[in-house]
Every structure is written in C-alpha cells, then in structure tokens.
Image (spheres, helix red, strand yellow):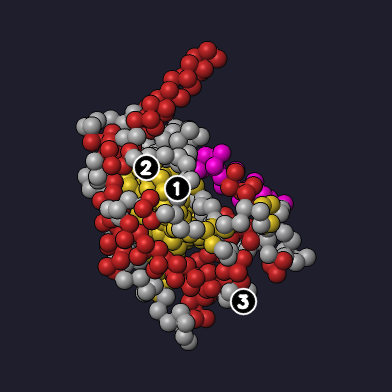
Amino acid sequence: MGVTDTTQQNSDRAQELKQFDESKLGVKGLVDSGLTSIPSLFVHPPETLSSLKPAQPRPASIRSIPTIDLSGWDSCRRPSVIEEAGRAARELGFFQVVNHGVPTEVLDRTITAVKAFNEQPMEAKARIYRREMDTGVAFFSNVDLFHSKAASWRDTLQIRLEPKPDMAEIPEVCRNEVMEWDQQIQRLGGILMGLLSEGLGLSPGKLQELTCPENRMMVGNYYPCCPQPNLTVGLASHTDPGVIAVLLQDQLPGLQVKHGDEWLDAPPIPGALVVNIGDILQIMSNNEYKSAEHRALANPNREPRVSIVVFHNLSNLDIQLGPLPELVSSAKPAAFRQFTMGEYMRAFFTNELNESLAHYFRA
C-alpha cells in the first residue's frame, strides 16, 4: 500500500470517527438503527482478535480470580483477610470480595439505574454527550475514541463523585441511586485501603493519608448486544489509573484479566464486587502490588451487559509520586522515578487505553 493510499485511509477513518462522535448516538444508537454488521471503525486488528475467546466456566483446579470474604475484617479475622488481600494484590492484582457490607438492594438499584439511563431516548442522553468533564458529568462512547486503533462496543456514563458535582447535572433517572452507591463505596474504599496498606507492612491509615483529599470517579459502562462479537471488544485491554478500582458487574460474563500469557475469566458472583490495583498503587508499592491488564469481551447476548466502576484517584495534580520510602531499600531499589499526578494524567489522556502507563515511569 502506498503513502497516498494510507493517507486517504487515515483521512477516511478520521472523518468516520468525527461523524460517529458528532451524531451523539453512541453504540446503542447504532444497535437501535437495526444494523447487522459493525462499522469498520470498530473492527480490531488481527493481533487483538486472535486472543479473544468466549468466557467459559473453569474447573476449580484451574487458576481463577480469588474471592475474599470480608466478614470479620475488623475483628480477629483481620490478619487472615490482610494476608489474602495482599497475596491477591501481589500475584494477580485482582480479587472479588463478598460480605463487604454493601446491601444487595443497593447493588441491584445501581445496575438498574445505569441501565435505565442508557435506555432513555437518544435526545435525553445527547444533552450530556461530551468529552469534557467541566460539569463533572458526561456521556460518551469510548474515552480513547480518537487515539485508539479501533473503537470498542460500549457507551459510558461518567460521573465525578468527589469533589462532588452540581447534583442537578447528574441525570435524574439515576441521581439518587448513584449518590446512595457512592456513600457505600466511599466506606468500602476506606476498608480496602486499610487492608492493602497493612498488606505492605504499613500502618492501616497510610494509603488513605496519601490519597487525601481523594478524587472518586464513577464510570458506568453499557455493552449492548454486538452483531459481530468476534470482530471487536467491549473494552480494550488496559490497566487502570489511580490507586484502586471497585467494580460492580451484572450477571452477564465478559470481564477477563491477564495473568502471564493467559486470559482468566472474572465470572460474576451474585453480591460480589471486583477490586483491582491501579497503576499508582503499583508504583507506590515499588512493584509489590500488580496493576493487571484486563478487558471486556463484546457482548453477544440480546440482553445488554452493565458494569459500574469507581476509581479511587489522587486529586492533587502537583503531588510528587513514586515508590514509598518505607518500601525502598538497598535490596529493593526504587523501580520507578518520581513524577507528578498531573504528568501521569496527561499521559493517560493522550495514549491508547491498552498502553500501561506504569512503564512510562520506570526508573
């Protein structure tokens, strides 16, 4: 292929992306139009497609995402819970938690509310379709739409939970449920930070001290039925920014976590929440904890799949980050250089999701 052909292809793709974004339809709008094949801008390259496989049940003998029972986290079981969480964070960077204290009714209402937002008429969603977060609330399709090699089959409602936005900006159809969810996840986030902090041999409050004042962002992903799930993904392989992420998923499978060269399924467990380590915590832990690659397969089911993740981030963009001094020694020197949170976020928003940013800051 000549330079002229490549230039023309790039120009055509840029125009296609612009038209899709300006339509404000999102992926659900494409599905509602009755299409039977996906537009070319969603088709992923062969190297991505070759690794895709449907989520399958795994025998108990095969490695899977660990599940940690949080009951008794503040009693005599605490050392055992700390040991389990620390081991999961070191070996995989992912685990599920049960008996976490968030009522099942809150989980169900949150899923239902985010689904209801996405299933409103297009005009209602288009009012907040934007790529800027000035108001603290945005609806869009693909945060990396203009940077990625291919778009993914999902739509997103993003809400800044802390610092709090004007409540009137949060769509009424899910406003109360999102606020109720945030109250619960703020409490659970503090518990998880304490356990993971002690898992590093630090004081229980160390990670929370470092992340205060905290910035929490909720991302509600809606994965409509995909007519050609073998040609695209729901969410491209990536690692998460921030300290930790807590994910609520409905009962449709699709989430996968990379361990070595293998993709492991993270099957939905009724009432469970998924916890994963973010890039910032991998860096602060001096590579003790792992920020694992993960992805979501395109949804082949007629019923849409919904997942809601809350990212616990740092709000001070000027803060200096790097491995914590307590975790650096002559036997284990710093694996990462110092940098600011602002530097990290600039890199995050100008790169594809599938590029792990921890590598950018290696010492």
Q: Are marks 1 and 3 in contact (CB under 8 Å)?
A: no
| Residue at x-position 38% and y-position 56% | 167
Q: Which residues are magenta?
A: 347-363
| Residue at the extreme bottom of the image, as rendered | 76
Question: How many neighbours does mark 2 have within 10 angstroms: few (below 14), some (14-19), or many (20 or more)?
Answer: some
- What SS does tag 2 mark? loop
Give the mark nearest the N terminus, 2 or 1: 2
Q: On the image, numbered disc 3 is attached to which residue?
A: 203
Q: Position of residue 118 (x, y in %)?
A: 29, 46
| Mark 1 → mark 3, Cα distance in angstroms | 36 Å
The answer to whether the residue labelled 2 contacts the one labelled 3, judged by CB atoms less than 8 Å apart, is: no
- Give the residue furthest to the right: 330
Labelled disc at residue 128: 2
Q: Say whether residue 52 is visible.
A: no
Residue type at tag 1: Thr
Residue in view at x 33 percent, y 47 percent: 222
